Amino acid sequence: MKIIVVDMYLLGDDSNKAALTRVTSMKDLGVIFDSKPKSEEKINNKINKASAILRIFFEILNHWIHILLLCYTKPSLGVN
C-alpha cells in the first residue's frame, strides 16, 4: 500500500470547504508574487507598464498640441 502526501489547504467550515490550488505566480495590487522569482520577468513587466503610461502621456500631449495649433493658426470666426 502506497501513501501519497499532497499539500492541501482548505478554507471554510465543515459543511462548506473549498480547496486552495497551488499556483506558480500571482499578481496582487500590482505586485507579482512568485515561488521562484525571476528578475527578468519582473523587469519586463515594469518596462511594459512604463511604456503604456508613456504612450498614453504622448497621445494626450499630441492631442493638446493639435488643439493649440488649431487655435493659433485658424482665424476666429465672427470676432472683430
Image (tube, helix red, strand yellow):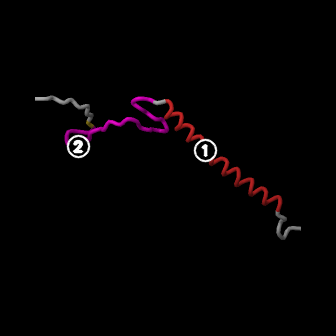
* Residue drawn at (26%, 41%) of the image: 18
Looking at the rendered structure, the secondary structure element under dot 1 is: helix
In the visual, does 17 lie left or right of 49? left
What whole-number distance in Å separates the C-alpha atoms at marks 2 and 1?
A: 43 Å
Crowd class of label 1 (few under 14; some 14 to 19; many from 20; radius 10 Å) = few
In the visual, does 48 lie left or right of 10? right
Looking at the rendered structure, the secondary structure element under dot 2 is: loop
Q: Which of disc 1 and disc 2 is earlier in sequence? A: 2
Give the x, y percent position of residue 61: 70, 50
Please say if 35 is above or below 27. Answer: above
* Residue drawn at (37%, 35%) of the image: 24
Circle 1: residue type: Ile
In the visual, does 27 lie left or right of 53? left
Query: Which corner quadrant of the image does residue 4 belong to?
Result: top left
* Residue drawn at (46%, 30%) of the image: 38
Please say if 54 is above or below 40. Answer: below
Label disc, if present, on residue 74 of the rendered structure = none
Q: Which residue is mark 1?
A: 53
Q: Which residue is mark 2?
A: 16
Circle 2: residue type: Asn
Q: Is residue 33 magenta?
A: yes
- Residue most extreme to the left: 1
Give the x, y percent position of residue 39: 50, 30
Task: Give the residues in magenta.
Answer: 11-37
Give the x, y percent position of residue 52: 59, 45
Give the x, y percent position of residue 63: 70, 55
In the visual, does 77 lie left or right of 43? right
* Residue drawn at (35%, 37%) of the image: 23
